[in-house]
Image (cartoon, grey):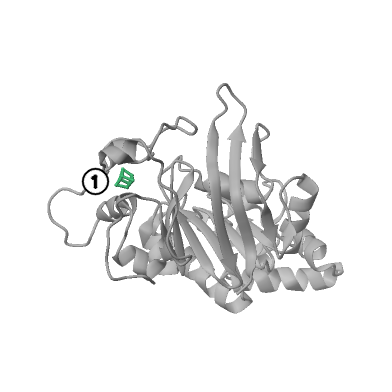
Amino acid sequence: MSALLEVRDLTVDFAGRPAPRAVDGVALSVAARERLAIVGESGSGKSQLLLACTGLLAANGSARGPVRFEGREILGNARSAAAARGRGIGFVFQDASGSLTPHRRIGDQLVEVAMASAGTGRRAAVDAAVEMLGRVRLAEPASLMARYPHELSGGMRQRVAIALMARPRILFADDPTTALDVTVQADILALLAQLCEDLGMALLIVTHDLGIVAALADRVAVMYAGRVVEVGMAAALLSRPRHPYTAGLLAAVPRLGGRGELATIPGAPPAPGEWFRGCRFAPRCPHRAEHCGVDDPVLAGPAARGVACHFPHTGSDTA
Ligand code: SF4
C-alpha cells in the first residue's frame, strides 16, 4: 500500500547555543485511512514532528528531511506546506483557540474555509458549513453559525475546530482532548473515530494517553528523546511491548481495581539536544548493560514491528 504521508530522516532544530534538536532522524508513514498514534512523554518531540510536517514550527525552528504528502514534497517552504494543508491535511490543536479566531462568528470562519477548500460559492459553502457542524454532532447547527467562539464550551469549540478542517485526507491531532473536561474527552475521541470512518480520513494523533491509543489507533510509534524507539500494530505493541520504555509507559497506566502504588519510570528524559553517547534511555532503563552506554541502538526489525534496543523483550509476536 502506498503511503499518503511519508516522513524520512526528519530532524527539527531550534536556534540556540548549542542548538536544541527536538526531533532526530525520524521516519514514519501513514497510509490512506490508517490511524497512527505517536506516544511519549512531554519533550519527546512528538508535537514538534507534527508542526514541522505542516510548516507550523515556531519562527526559531527549522526542519530537514523529506516529508511527502500524496507523493509531493511539502517540506522546505511555507507555500508548499500551506498548499498541502489546503488540499488535504487538517490540524486540530490541544486547545481549539489555536484554530478559531475569537472575534469572528463561527459561521463566517466555516464558510471561508469551505469556499477556499472546495472552491464553491457562498451559498453552497453555507450549506456545507451547516452540514459539517451537524456531522461533528453539534445541536442546532444553523443557529450556531451566528455565535462567537467564547459563547461555546471547550468541548463545543473543539468540535467546531474539527468541523473547520472540512474534509482532509489526513487529520493531524495534537493531544486533542488534553485541555478538555474528562467527561467530554471520550465524546471527542468517538467523534474522531466516526469521522475517519465517514469521510475515509487517515489520522495522525499525538498523545501521552495510552487509553487513547488503545481506543483509536491501528498502529503506534513510541518516541523518546527525539527518536522513534518502537513501532508496531497497536494491539501487539500494547499487549507485548518490546522496548523497556514502552513497557514502562504501560506499567504506569492506572488500572481499575489496581492495588498498591502505581509504577513509574524513574528519572526524567534528557532535555532536547542534550543527548549523550549510547542509548538515550539508559539512565532510566532497568535492563541496561555496559554495551548500552557505548553503542546507540537504531530502530531495527520488520517494517511492521521495529524496536531500537540492544536487548528488547522477546516474545512470539512478530505482527
Ligand atoms: S539499549 Fe539497553 S539501555 Fe537502551 S533500552 Fe535497550 S536495554 Fe535499555
Q: Residue at x 58, y 56 (%)?
A: 157
Q: Residue furthest top?
A: 17
User: In the rendered image, is residue 160 in sight?
Assistant: no
Ligand 1's quadrant is top left
Neighbours of disc 1 within 10 Å: few (<14), some (14-19), many (20+): few
Q: Residue at x 28, y 50 (%)?
A: 248
Left or right: residue 177 versus residue 312 is: right
User: In the rendered image, is residue 63 in sight?
Assistant: yes
Q: Residue furthest right?
A: 121
Q: Residue furthest left?
A: 260
Classify the position of the N terminus by image quarter: bottom right
Residue 99, percent from left and from top? 64, 51
Residue 211, percent from left and from top? 36, 61
Residue 150, percent from left and from top? 60, 49
Q: Residue at x 74, y 51 (%)?
A: 81
Which residue corresponds to mark 1?
287
Give the residue type that dot 1 points to.
His
Classify the position of the C terminus by image quarter: bottom left
Residue 160, percent from left and from top? 62, 60
Closer to us: 169 or 267: 267
Q: Quadrant of residue 15?
A: top right
**Looking at the image, is 135 positioned above or below residue 253?**
below
Instruction: Report if the beta carbon of the residue with label 1 is closer than 8 angstroms to ligand 1.
Output: yes
Secondary structure under badge 1? loop
**Looking at the image, is 233 positioned above or below residue 208?**
below
Closer to us: 185 or 86: 86
